[in-house]
Amino acid sequence: MAAQPWQLYNAALQYIGDGTHDLNDDTDWAVALFAASSNCATLTNGVFADLTDELPTANGYTAGGQILGGQTYTQTGGVATFDSDDVEWTASGGDLTARFAVYYRLTTVNLVVQPLLCVCELDDAGDVTASDGNPFRITMDPAGLFTVQRAA
């Protein structure tokens, strides 16, 4: 897989600034999978309900995605990095195919229902498929999902 970098949603910048996305809080984060026809790569989306064409509950995937753990937000030498554990589904009952992954909060925070954080196109060559019985794994970059660096 030649995954593209995770891209922050425009609203996520506001959500980080106003505390809606508390990046030090490692609870209630999830990753959901979306089809190629989804609008999830449109960075003007703000909440999960704005998104179309999430994969249905089938073939080892459950709508809403998978809860993640291991979120870390570290600051070293003027660079802040956000990272999390990898996520994996096992294709079952058929192939599991997706084009995009979306990272979001499962809860309502600061009156925002399921705010979005970032989106990733899983492979720049097209859909990614795990055949029946095999893992569909998203390996987070060891350098983190994203970094923020102060201006020089």
Image: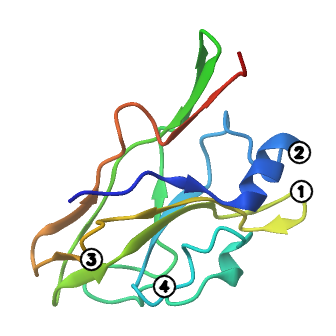
Q: Is mark 2 on a helix, strand or loop?
A: helix
Coordinates of residue 41 in the picture (x, y in percent): 54, 73
What's the mark number on residue 54?
4
- N-terminal-most mark, 1 or 2: 2
Residue 52 vertical position relative to residue 112 in the rendered view, above or below: below
Of the residues shown, which amino acid type is indicated by label 2? Asp
| Residue assigned mark 1 | 110
Residue at mark 3: 126
Q: Could you tell me which secondary element the residue under label 3 belongs to?
A: loop
Q: Which of marks 3 and 1 is in front?
A: 3
Density class for disc 1 (Cα within 10 Å; few <14, some 14-19, many ≥20) is few
Marks 1 and 2, Cα distance to the nearest angstrom?
Answer: 9 Å
Q: Which residue is drawn at 72% across and 64% down?
A: 115
Image quarter of residue 108: bottom right
Q: Is the Cβ of the residue at disc 4 closer than 8 Å to that at disc 1? A: no
User: Where, quadrant-wise, is the N terminus in this rendering?
Assistant: bottom left
Q: How much space separates mark 2 and mark 3, taking CA atoms?
A: 35 Å
Question: Which numbered disc flags the more N-terminal residue, 2 or 4?
Answer: 2
Residue 47 higher or lower than 68, as above or below: below
Instruction: Choose the circle earlier in sequence order: 3 or 1.
Output: 1
Mark 4: amino acid: Glu
For the point 84% across and 41% down, the residue is 17
- Mark 2 against mark 3, which lies toward the viewer? 3
